[in-house]
Amino acid sequence: MHGLPLIDDPNLIVGMEKAEDAGVYKLSDDLAIIQTVDFFTPIVDDPYMFGQIAAANALSDVYAMGGQPLTAMNIVCFPIKTMNISILRNILEGGLEKMKEAGVVLVGGHSVEDPELKYGLSVTGTIHPSKVLTNVGAEVGDGLVLTKPIGTGIVNTAIKGGMATEESIEAVTKHMASLNKTAAQVMQEIGTNACTDVTGFGLIGHAFEMIEGTGKGMVINASSIPILPDAMGFAEMGLVPAGTYRNREFRINQVDIDTHLSPYLSDLFFDPQTSGGLLIALPQSKADELVKRLKEEGIEEATLIGKVVENPKERILVR
């Protein structure tokens, strides 16, 4: 999108200037709408679960801004000549079930015939204009809380290669299909400085977006990061998606990873996530309370993984 002439509007709170999760437009002094869209090709074999994951992934951008999703529209690309329509029905049922869980109303959609199956949602949500969370705003001393384990890209690569165990398939599917709804509600109650969801750029890529251009840095504790079952073993086997290498290449000069750490951990740090968790920056005094509350709400993997620091400026230390 770089280089496009953007339209300036005084009511546009969050637009396309930075790599934000969604757009936010102010309607009145106490109401703004959040808009986002996301769709992709299947990442699991079960059509119903694919529908759930795609819906959870699209809804996540609204939660990352601290908002409440209200309505959604289906986006469908389907190979009607080569695939049974019952598969599409299962996908849409999975998506609908996830929308119901989120309290979201399906209001329409659009489908096109396409040789490659794709599904997702366009989502509209609401938020108070003064409560919008962006991926910048983290303060020096803030703790960094991650709400889901990483490794979905690597485990999904193992699934495609027929190498994944039932346990790892079940774990990755459960986490990708789980909503960031509760995490968003709790972080808004406690008070947060910045938030993003961890998706295609991996943990390091999205973490760096929180400090880019701010003059601040980050320290991440490798041993604290929650990792999906078998993800490390799959990384050691070389089951790493192409996106991991692209992410590493893009950010490696801004990251110092301790040489004592396994090189395979680096694969996990840059692994592109599907429907990943929220990465939340908030005052250290509140970070422990957030983790405790999230665990009480059933988000068991929520962990304090690092902090925002003054130095090194605009670098991430992983140790």
Image: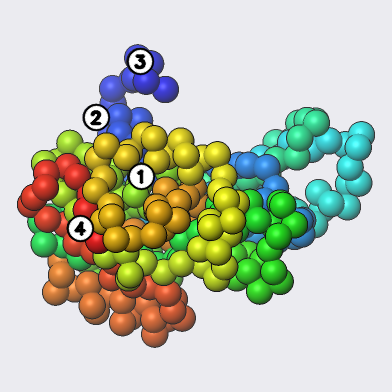
According to the picture, the residue beneath numbered tag 1 turns out to be 205
In this orientation, does residue 48 appear? yes
Residue 258 found in image quarter: bottom left
Residue 98 found in image quarter: bottom right
Tell me the mark number nearer the camera, choosing from 2 and 3. Answer: 3
**N-terminal of the two: label 2 or label 1?**
2
Q: Secondary structure at mark 1?
A: helix
* Mark 2 surroundings within 10 Å by alpha-carbon count, few (fewer than 14), some (14 through 19), many (20 or more): few
**N-terminal of the two: label 2 or label 3?**
3
Asked whether 56 or 30 is in front, the reply is 56
Question: Which quadrant is home to the N terminus?
Answer: top left
Q: Secondary structure at mark 2?
A: loop
**N-terminal of the two: label 3 or label 1?**
3
Asked whether 265 or 221 is in front, the reply is 265
Asked whether 197 or 109 is in front, the reply is 197
Tell me the mark number nearer the camera, choosing from 3 and 1. Answer: 1
- The amino acid sitting under disc 3 is Gly
According to the picture, the residue beneath numbered tag 3 turns out to be 3
- Per the model, the C-alpha gap separating discs 3 and 1 is 22 Å
Q: Which circle marks residue 256 in the picture? A: none
According to the picture, the residue beneath numbered tag 2 turns out to be 10
Marks 3 and 1 close (CB-CB < 8 Å): no
- The amino acid sitting under disc 2 is Pro
Marks 2 and 4 close (CB-CB < 8 Å): no
- The amino acid sitting under disc 1 is Gly
According to the picture, the residue beneath numbered tag 4 turns out to be 219
How far from the left and from the top, in percent, is residue 140?
Answer: 10, 56
- From the viewer's perspective, tell me whether residue 222 is left or right of residue 86: left
Q: Residue furthest bottom?
A: 296
Q: Give me the residue at 32% from left, 70% from top.
A: 224
